[in-house]
Amino acid sequence: MPDQRTVLITGATGNIGRHIVAALAAAGHPVRAASRHRPTDPAAAAHHIPFDWHDPATHRPAVGGVHAVYLMPPPVSADPVGQVGAFLDLAQDAGVRRVVLLSSSAIRTGNPGPGQLPTAVTDRFPEWAVLRPSWFMQNFVAEHHHHGASIRRDGEIVTATGDGRVGFIDAADIAAVAVRALTDPVPHNAEHLLTGPQTHSYADVAAMISEAGGRPVRHRTVDVDTMRRRLVDSGIPDGFAALLAGMDAAIAAGAENRTTSTVADVTGRAPTSLRDFCTAHADHWRPA
Ligand SMILES: NC(=O)c1ccc[n+]([C@@H]2O[C@H](COP(=O)([O-])OP(=O)(O)OC[C@H]3O[C@@H](n4cnc5c(N)ncnc54)[C@H](OP(=O)(O)O)[C@@H]3O)[C@@H](O)[C@H]2O)c1
């Protein structure tokens, strides 16, 4: 008999959240799919609950009667701890026991800003997991991501990463780990550093997309301040743009040049390779 305790999934229409909703609903778990817009997938739409980080009136109805929460923090906030902390207080009062937080491999727990969120979770809840994925393969596909946009518009990927390498990961693999962290009988109570199976430079990525999509895509490297300004021009608030550009500098210095076995350890199956991801998404990059 499936576990009948309710799971709230924030960011439910996003790269990760939509896979979590689909997997839990298919396994018979009661789910609440929280986002501002109704999911377009009818199966997910049936579980939708309106939720906006900037509208606290939507927070209490979302957490009432919930056992576990997948927490995607407010997007593009460089200092989310006040807003998320208030939500976590409500969740604690409502009896939530388990929180699975989406963080990032680039965010060190304990650092200022988003680095304060893991402690905000572990201080309040007896059962938890912190997911620290590397950079998403979906960044090269998503319409709203600056890489996806510049590939389509200019045939280029622009970063301040130089030749730095990254263990790019498929968001579906992050979701598979999240599902286990949300539902395993024994709470993980651990940070999971998540990567794909290999590291690649952005020049490697450009070459793979060119091959898969049948059109030339190049990598152009810029300095950190130029990167910050590009991100601001693409609509990202300055504080978060500075954070992201700084992460590029860290990649150039080798911070993301690593792989872990965590996806396979937690889910029992190997993570998707970037080459397989590019083959599967080739239609996104083909010339019109
Ligand atoms: N991209 C990367 O390489 C990378 C790497 C490591 C970590 N991360 C982290 O991953 C997160 C992004 O995850 P993702 O790719 O799954 O996101 P995503 O695909 O961009 O989706 C964002 C989700 O959040 C919802 N949302 C947006 N604004 C909201 C608001 N004001 N209130 C409530 N919900 C809101 C969206 O739905 P609605 O618009 O309908 O509300 C959507 O469901 C970020 O926190 C980032 O720090 C990203």
Image (cartoon, rainbow, N blue to C red):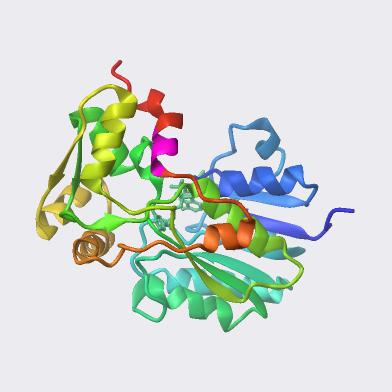
**Viewer can see residue 164:** yes
x%, y% of residue 191?
52, 73
Q: Quadrant of residue 128?
A: bottom right
Q: In the image, what residue occupies the spot 77% across and 47% down?
A: 27
Residue sitting nearer the eye, 61 or 111: 111
Q: Is residue 223 above or below residue 33?
A: below
Highlighted magenta segment, given as a residue range: 274-278
x%, y% of residue 241?
24, 58
Quarter of the image with the C terminus is top left
Q: Is residue 148 magenta?
A: no
Residue sitting nearer the eye, 176 or 43: 176
> How many callouts does the rendering have?
0
Q: Is residue 286 above or below residue 250?
A: above
Q: Is residue 137 above or below residue 120?
A: above
Q: Is residue 172 left or right of residue 282?
A: right
Q: In the image, what residue occupies the spot 20% across and 51% down?
A: 232
Q: Is residue 51 left or right of residue 237?
A: right
Q: Is residue 167 above or below residue 14?
A: below
**Viewer can see residue 60:** no
x%, y% of residue 197?
44, 53
x%, y% of residue 50?
61, 48
Residue sitting nearer the eye, 204 or 106: 204
Q: In the image, what residue occupies the spot 33% across and 66% down?
A: 78
